[in-house]
Amino acid sequence: MTTLTLPTRPLPTRRAEEWRYSDLEALATIWPTPAPVRIDVAAGDTARHHLLQDAGEGAAAVHDYAISIADGARCDFHVLNIGGKFGRVTFTVTLGKNSHFELKGAIIGGGDQVLEIITAVTHAEADATSGQTIRSILGQRATGSYLGSINVARDAQRTDAFQSVKAMLLDRTATANAKPELEIYADDVKCAHGATVGELDKQALFYMASRGMDPATAKTLLLKAFVAGVFDDVADEAVKDSLEAAAIAKLETLV
């Protein structure tokens, strides 16, 4: 009897753009990772998903999603990436005609964490829309990365898509990487992207201190406001509460 041995995927290297900022040593402890989770949204349907990536201290976690959205369908995904030594969430999305994809995500990291959200959204047909909103808060020596592409096929006329990426650094030793990309082959499209990296507003902190607020509370309030919009539209109140509670608990460890 002959046993068939399937080849093992080689461990990625930093020569691959999508792995440039990753913790490959941590990745090696769980490699090879499972096949992506498939989400197929049928024509005219609406799907809502969420992920709280909260792996234990020192652990590595990779969550890959392959999402196909049929004509006239919609998929909303909320993600909070806060756990583990290395936490990575990826989305490969294909949009049909007159469909919509909405991703809202937050990365909150401290210590030596490396946390990533990677996206590749393909508008394959006409009249589809997509939005990606990512907010990162990074302290100590943490690294947070968003690498996202919007790819518009030649027949995907009247595409409307955007990426909004903002990062807040609590310490000068933290690192934020942002690389929004557009690849457009159609000529009747509306696509936009923007990325900013900043620090807490010192004037706002001074004002709050002058009103008697202690520094930790002031910082926490400002940081909560920074990420608040990410989870405002979660339809399930229990899910919304759990994501917001996890985000606040993580923030309190950084201030």
Image: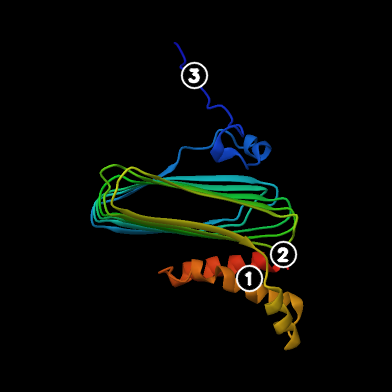
Q: Position of residue 91 (x, y in %)?
A: 45, 47
Left or right of 83? Residue 211 is: right
Q: Nearer the viewer, residue 159 or 117?
A: 159
Q: How crowded is mark 2: few (under 14 residues within 10 Å), some or many (20 or more)?
A: some
Q: Which one is in front in this view, the residue at disc 1 or the one at disc 3?
A: 1
> Could you say which disc has been placed on residue 5 in the image?
3
| Res 136 → quadrant | bottom right
Residue corresponding to mark 1: 223
Q: Which amino acid does label 1 sit on?
A: Leu
Residue 162 image offset from top left, x and y in percent: 42, 57
- The answer to whether residue 214 shows anywhere in this view is yes
Q: Residue at x 62, y 69 (%)?
A: 248
Tell me the quarter of the image containing the N terminus: top left
Q: Residue sitting at 71 percent across and 65 percent down? A: 253
Q: Which of the pair 136/83 is nearer the observer?
A: 136
Q: Earlier in the sequence, mark 2 or mark 1?
A: 1
In the image, is residue 89 above or below residue 47? above
Do the residues under discs 2 and 1 have CB atoms within 8 angstroms?
yes
Q: What residue type is labelled 3?
A: Thr
Q: Distance between the residues labelled 1 and 3?
A: 50 Å
Dot placed on the residue nearer the N-terminal end, 2 or 3 = 3
Left or right for 29, reference 10: right
Amino acid on which disc 2 is placed: Leu
- Residue 254, label in figure: 2
Is 253 rendered above or below residue 207?
above
Secondary structure category for the residue under label 3: loop
The reply to whether callout 1 and callout 3 are in contact (CB within 8 Å) is no
